[in-house]
Image (tube, helix red, strand yellow):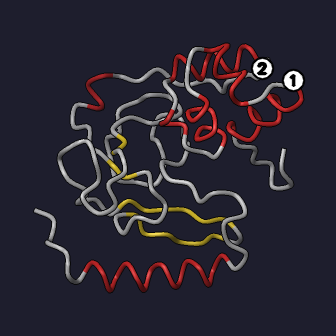
Amino acid sequence: MTEDGKDNLHKRLRRARIEAGLTQAALAQQVGCKQSAVSMMEAGRREAMARETLVKVAALLKVDLPEIPAATPQAFSHAISLCGNFSCPSNLPYAVGDDVYFLPLGNVGRGRHCIFCGELLLSVCAHCATPIAHRGGCCGACGELFVELPEGYVEDVSGWVAGRVEAIESLRRFLPSET
């Protein structure tokens, strides 16, 4: 656990893989996925790995997955898509202490890829596979963040956030409004 009591699943899985003496490629081969999926998952992009594969990885590495509340299908009848790219102008960053959170602003397109950055859109939570039903920053079912800043990406969190917000606001003035 980190000093603030928050420990991310992808960090625990990475530590467990290293402690088990496995390379990303060896782990990928054992669970039936690509090494790149393991790499992206360990970087915090769990949407790169199917939930079933994540369960296999956790079982192999003897890491407990958090309890996921059962989703009620009728509560998620209006699923939406979000961009999982932390640097996309569709995600507005904000700082709380030394942590960065993202508020998805929407207007990312109706296809499979974001119209701003080209990343694959998220339509379900990468952690629990619950359909995304709101534009908030975290899953309503399990509480995991939809968009994460890679660990160690910036040293000056508040300065980076202020610069990104200014750049996004400037860019969004030229973008079509959401209808």
Q: Is residue 104 above or below residue 16?
A: below
With 11 as the anchor, is 145 left or right in this view? left
Of the pair 170 and 93, the residue shown nearer to us: 170
> Which disc number belongs to residue 136?
none
Foreground disc of the pair 2, 1? 1
Q: Quadrant of the N terminus?
A: top right
- Position of residue 50 measured from the top left corner of the image (x, y, whole percent): 48, 24
Query: In the rendered structure, which amino acid carries the disc numbered 2?
Result: Leu
Q: Quadrant of the C terminus?
A: bottom left
Of the pair 99 and 21, the residue shown nearer to us: 21
Q: Are marks 2 and 1 in contact (CB under 8 Å)?
A: yes
- Position of residue 152 measured from the top left corner of the image (x, y, whole percent): 72, 63
> Which disc number belongs to residue 61?
2
- Position of residue 97 measured from the top left corner of the image (x, y, whole percent): 69, 72
Residue holding disc 1? 20
Disc 1 on helix, strand or loop? loop
Q: Residue at x 48, y 36 (%)?
A: 47
Query: In the rendered structure, which amino acid carries the disc numbered 1?
Result: Ala
Question: Rounded to the nearest whole Å, what is the CA distance between mark 2 and mark 1?
Answer: 7 Å
- Position of residue 88 measured from the top left corner of the image (x, y, whole percent): 40, 64
Q: Residue at x 33, y 38 (%)?
A: 123
Residue 98 quadrant: bottom right
N-term-proximal mark, 2 vs 1: 1
For disc 1, the neighbor class at 10 Å (few under 14, some 14 to 19, many from 20) is few
With 177 as the anchor, is 165 left or right in this view? right
